[in-house]
Image (tube, helix red, strand yellow):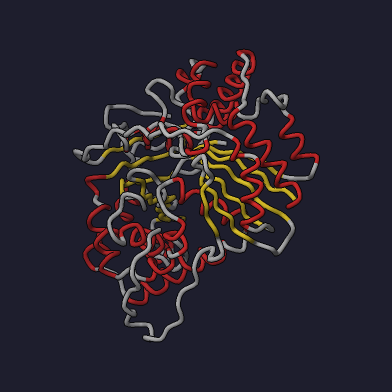
Amino acid sequence: MSASSSPAPHPDKGANAAPLPKIAPNAVEFRLGNGMDVVVIPDHRAPVVTHMVWYKVGAADEQPGQSGLAHFFEHLMFKGTRNHPEGRFSEAVSDIGGEENAFTTLDYTAYFQRVAKENLGEMMAFEADRMRHLTLADEQVATERDVVIEERRLRIDNDPGAQMSEQLARILYMNHPYGKPVIGWMHEIEALNRTAALDFYNRYYTPANAVLVVAGDVTAEEVRRLADLTYGQIAGRTDLERAPRPAEPPSAGARAITVRDEKVREPQVQRVYIVPSKRTSEKHEAEALTILAEILGGNTTSRFYDNLVRGNGPATYAGAYYQSSGIDNTRFIVYGVPKAGVTLQALTDAMQAEIARLATGGISDDELRRARNAVLAQAIYAQDSQQAMARIIGTALVTGSTLAEIQNWPSQIDAVSADDVRDVARRYLREDQTATGYLEPLAEPADSGAPQNGPHGESLSEPQSEAA
């Protein structure tokens, strides 16, 4: 999301059109003395608050050979501190009827609680305590490592769709760490230990590397007072700098992977392109990619639905998705399930043909208007959810956006032109720069239409991926 000067009116709008609403227009931001950034989103409709702490570290920041450490450490943050035994924090949340959870992605890790407003100070005290006073015994680390190993077995190794997504990321990003799974590779999870966990904690879990987002029935003044009493008591650091990540070189050609498994009930295809994220994009590119995803496969008026799903089209369903958040270049995904008698390759070709048609022929003013309105409506409706707003703003802040850019994002969507959409399709959704994953039942006819192996002769069994 980005901000710029106000665009000239579109041809389909009057010069005196009402200004677009902002995202969280009443949000307030400030910084504690130790460098911790705080954003408050007042919402007085109900006496509850969502309290989230976001750390600017994820799976892509792990050292070589330590895949899964960021997610593993998320688990370890629930193991107790010098002030509270293991389980006490979660017990306190449960006792007051609250909710809690945590999640890890490639770029960040977040922890949150949703509680009655009078319990906010208690949540902040607990969260600040484990930011600095976590204690880990070897036995706790070993036990939790076994939990994560079992989680990987259940969520990845026993799920052919997850295996396909994991291997697809690996062939998409050959050099950049976005190619590794958030949960980690099994053999590297098995080697994680207390020393690695504490080194990770001491390096990344510090106020200046965190963002506090509080949404709900509070004022900025109330949150500032509580934050000073809790997080503000932790000493600041100035030596933390995110290590640079290796760049992904241009692809020498299209890549593909096929996964066959007896648990697969219907074949499907995912095709992925590396595209700019909001942080790495040039003017309007991220917003144009957002509109492009909506036009291609966002809803039942999309090109994929009209031309691939309706009537005699080759797909049971088909869609498109753009993962806009990311420290580095991110993913644009198209996907589909073929109708009976249609090969995966035929459906893939049909999706790419729709992209090529848009890239050469452009889009109509009506398509642009409908897509723009749909995207803006989704953003406006999201503001009805306190927790959704906390997540939207937290995600954007820890991946390089400012609060002002987030708030002005509707204006940037509104400024996207038909040429902008055509240009990003032409520039980034090229067939020779794709990575494609095919998922099939194990017992397939000889002519399934999917490649028989991957780019290196292999036949193997997220959008920003997330592990809880």
Quadrant for the C terminus, please: top right
Could you tell me which residue is drawn at 47 percent across and 68 percent down?
A: 376
Q: Is residue 454 left or right of residue 26?
A: left
Q: Residue 252, percent across and down?
A: 19, 38
Q: Residue 197, percent across and down?
A: 52, 21
Residue 136 found in image quarter: top right
Q: Considering only vertical position in the picture, is 369 above or below 127?
A: below
Q: Residue furthest front?
A: 33
Q: Is residue 37 left or right of residue 138?
A: left
Q: Considering only vertical position in the picture, is 297 above or below 340?
A: below
Front residue (pair 132, 102): 132
Q: Residue furthest left?
A: 252
Could you tell me which residue is drawn at 35 percent across and 46 percent down?
A: 330
Q: Considering only vertical position in the picture, is 193 above or below 384?
A: above
Front residue (pair 42, 363): 42
Residue 442 in view of the camera: no
Could you tell me which residue is drawn at 33 percent across and 74 percent down?
A: 7
Residue 289 found in image quarter: bottom left
Q: Is residue 455 left or right of residue 404?
A: left
Q: Residue 60, percent across and down?
A: 40, 33
Could you tell me which residue is drawn at 34 percent across and 57 percent down?
A: 286
Q: Residue furthest right?
A: 95
Q: Residue 296, percent across and down?
A: 37, 61
